Amino acid sequence: MKKRITIPEVVKMLLPVFMVVVFCLTRHPVRVLADEPNLKLYAKAAVLMDADSGRVLYDLCGDEQLPMASTTKIMTLIVTLENADPEDTVMVSSYAASMPQVHLGIRSGEQYRLKDLMYSLMLESHNDSAVAIAEHVGGSVEHFAELMNRKAAEIGCRNTYYITPNGLDAAEDGRIHSTTARDLALVMSYCITKSPQKDTFLEITRTPDYSFTDLSGKRSFSCTNHNAFLNMMTGALSGKTGFTGKAGYCYVGALRQNEKTLVVALLACGWPNHKTYKWSDTRTLMEYGLDNYSYRSFDEVAIPREATEAIPVKNAQGNEIGEDVYVKIRAVTQEGDLARDGLLMRDDEKITVTLHKVKSLTAPVPKGLEIGTVSYLTDNEEWKRVSLVTDEEIKRIDMGWCIRRVLERWFVKSE
C-alpha cells in the first residue's frame, strides 16, 4: 500500500527548491535581456547611436516615452547657448530660489553671470540654477519650455515633451515631462556634432571643477563635475546624469574614438541603491559599438551604369527634323544629411543601391533638371542620395526652328 503524502510534507520537500530560487533572484538583480544582439542591460530603455548619422546601432525599447530627470539639462544648456549671451546678468526670482535639492542655494534678488549658472547647471545639476536660466532666457519657465520643445522638433525628436528646465517630475494637460532613449540620444548627438555652439557645450560639460561668485562678490561657490564616465573610457566626450523618483537613474553620454562618435542614452536604469547600473550599461553599449561597428564608405558600391546614360527627349530641336535627341545626365551628391560619404556598419551588413529615373522627357528641358535619384540603403533605410540631373539644355521644336531647317536644306540643294 502506497504511503499518502500530506500537504505539510509537500511543503517541506519543496522548501529547499523555493529558497534556492529566491536566493538566485535576490543575489543578482534581474537584468533586461534584449533580443538581438544578446546584451544584458539594467535599463528599461536604451539606445546606442552613431552621433554623426543619427543611426541607431542598438535599441531596447528605444521609442518608449519615459521621464528623463536631469538629462533634461542638456537641452536647457543648448537652448541657452543658442539664444543668449553667456555674459548676461541673471536676476534670481523667488520661484527660482525655491527649487528643491539638488540646488545651488541662490537667493531671491541676487545677480549672477549667466555663464556661471550654466556651469552650476551641468556640473552639479542644480535645479534652482536651471529655473533662473530659463526665466532669464525665455521670460518664464513656460516660454522656455516652448523653446525646448521647438528645438526638440527641429532636431527630429518624435516623442519628447518638456515642461521643466531641470527635469523634475511634472505633468500638464494630461502629458508628463518625458522623452525616449532615441530622442535623448538625438539631442546629445545634436549638441556635440551639429549645434553652432557645440564647442562651448563640450567645454562646459567636460570641465572638472569650476568656481565663481555672485556679482556682488559676497558669496562664493565651487562646482565639481559628477559625470564619472569622463574618466571611464578613452575618448569620453560629454554626458549628463539624472534621477527622480519616477524616472529612476538616467544617463546620456558621448564618446569619440577611431572615427566613431557614439552616444548612449539610458532611461529607468535602476533605483536606489543601484546608481552604478548606468555606468555598467554605458560601458557595455559603448564597447559593443566600438567592437562591432566600423566606418564604411558608400564608394564600395558604384552608381549603376544606366543611371548616367542619356535619355531621349521628345519634340526636341536636332540637326534634322524627326531626328532622335538625347540629353546627357550627370550625378550630383545631395546636400545636407543625405550627403554623407559613409556610415558606421557591422561587417555582416550590406549597402544596397536603388535607382529611380524617368525614361524620357519632352522639350523644352533646362540644364540641371532633376530626373531621378540613386539611393544608398542599409537595413532598408536611406543614408545617402545622389541626384541625377540634365547636363545640357534642350530646346523645343518651334516654327522658327522649322523654317531655319527648311531654308538650310533648300540652300544646300540649290548649290
Image (cartoon, rainbow, N blue to C red):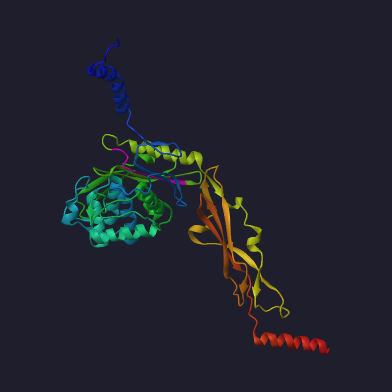
In the displayed structure, 317 sits above or below 121; it is below
Residue 386 part of the magenta-drawn span = no
Where residue 139 appears, as percent x and y from the top left, is: 24, 62
Q: Quadrant of the C terminus?
A: bottom right
Q: Which of 142 and 408 is in front in this view?
A: 408
Q: What secondary structure do most residues of the magenta stretch adopt?
A: strand
Q: Is residue 83 visible?
A: yes
Count of labels in the image: 0
Q: Residue at x 34, y 55 (%)?
A: 78
Where residue 181 appears, as percent x and y from the top left, is: 36, 47
Residue 262 part of the magenta-drawn span = yes
Which range of residues does the magenta coloring cover?
A: 261-270
Q: Which residue is drawn at 49% across and 38% down?
A: 291
- In the rendered view, does 59 fall on the left or right side of 301? left
Name the quadrant containing residue 48: top left
Where residue 147 appears, as percent x and y from the top left, is: 30, 60
